[in-house]
Image: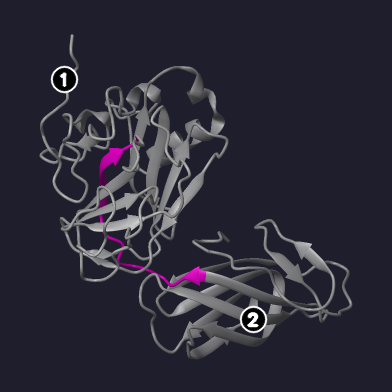
Amino acid sequence: MKNIYLFLMGACIALGSCSTGDNGVSSFFGGGGSSQALLYLGSKAVSEDEVEFEFSRKVSISQINFEPKLSIASVEEGSTVKIKLEEGTKPGVLITADLLAEDEKRNTINVLVSFRSRNNRMPDMVINEVNAVYSKPKAEFIEFKMKSNGNLGAARVVIHGNTNAAKQTIYEFKPVEVKKDDYVTLHLRTTEDGSLDEYGTNLSESGGPNSSPTGRDFWIAGSAKLMHIEASIIYVLDQDDKVLAAVMISNQTANWWGKDYLAEAAEMIYNNGAWKSKDGKLPGPIDAVNPTGATATRTICRDESTENTKTQSEWYITATSSATPGKANNPTRYVPKP
């Protein structure tokens, strides 16, 4: 089973020997008659009122606690333990589970894991504007435009770039209600005090460069470079690893596309129906948005007057000083000097 949107908070706690499963979660075992390690394999919120925990073989549950506290209606044991809750959870809430499991050989495992509750109200969205150039104090940003009402809780923003990191989840949203046509800007560095995540109703709460009084602003702490204008594939995932929105950016020079992880990311978003070539085929570097001419104020913009074709054709570089995070894109286009 896939380990879907788990933020694993640590390993498991008990006396005995230790082993690490394929998902990197340490598992500690108590006494028992089997030398084969009992492994915890993953967790998944399958609905608003049901959570599953998977183990390497059939187990019984002797103890389970949730934080925040959740009332349990029933427990179905097996290699996949199904926990039914008395009431449904709100979408995208961070939950910590602490459970003690035992197999038929009396091997025990104590698992401490965190995950987000099921969100069945993910909004439709598009990536609408990208600043891929850092010019202190203005940081790179990704702007999203909502195409339907919903809740962003547990949506994950991922960047594949021309770096040693093949894949990097840069941000996971906490629960926040959004409406159709809302603008949401994720700033990729925090350069000033007062740069606040706007999870409440006050959209002018956040200061900071490129913050908007009319759109929601969110900030990634620190000053690390997360996006490369030469080559970046940006996308948003839901809890089933479905791609909700994507864009490919490339200066279309040759060598970087040879990196396996970039080609694999392009194939993945294509297979999810999130990006393609103009003729509908698997996209390569030539099918990415060309950022040539972009600066911190000449951003990479989607033409909001057009249909979302999920190709490079609807994208352009806006004119100098025309970046518009948190509001409609400026339609004036940058024209290079001859």
Image quadrant containing the C terminus: top left
The answer, for residue 79, to whether it is visible in the render is no
Residue 86 place in picture, x, y as percent: 43, 89
With 338 as the anchor, is 62 left or right in this view?
A: right
The answer, for residue 27, to whether it is visible in the render is yes
Residue type at numbered disc 1: Val
In magenta stretch: residue 125? yes
Residue 202 place in picture, x, y as percent: 20, 68
Asked if 54 appears above or below 67 in the picture, the reply is above
Q: How is the image coloured?
A: one colour
Q: Which label is found at residue 271?
A: none
Q: How many marks?
A: 2
Looking at the image, which residue is at 15% across and 55% down? 181
Q: Disc 2 marks which residue?
A: 99
In magenta, the rendered stretch is 115-132
Asked if 271 appears above or below 213 in the picture, the reply is above
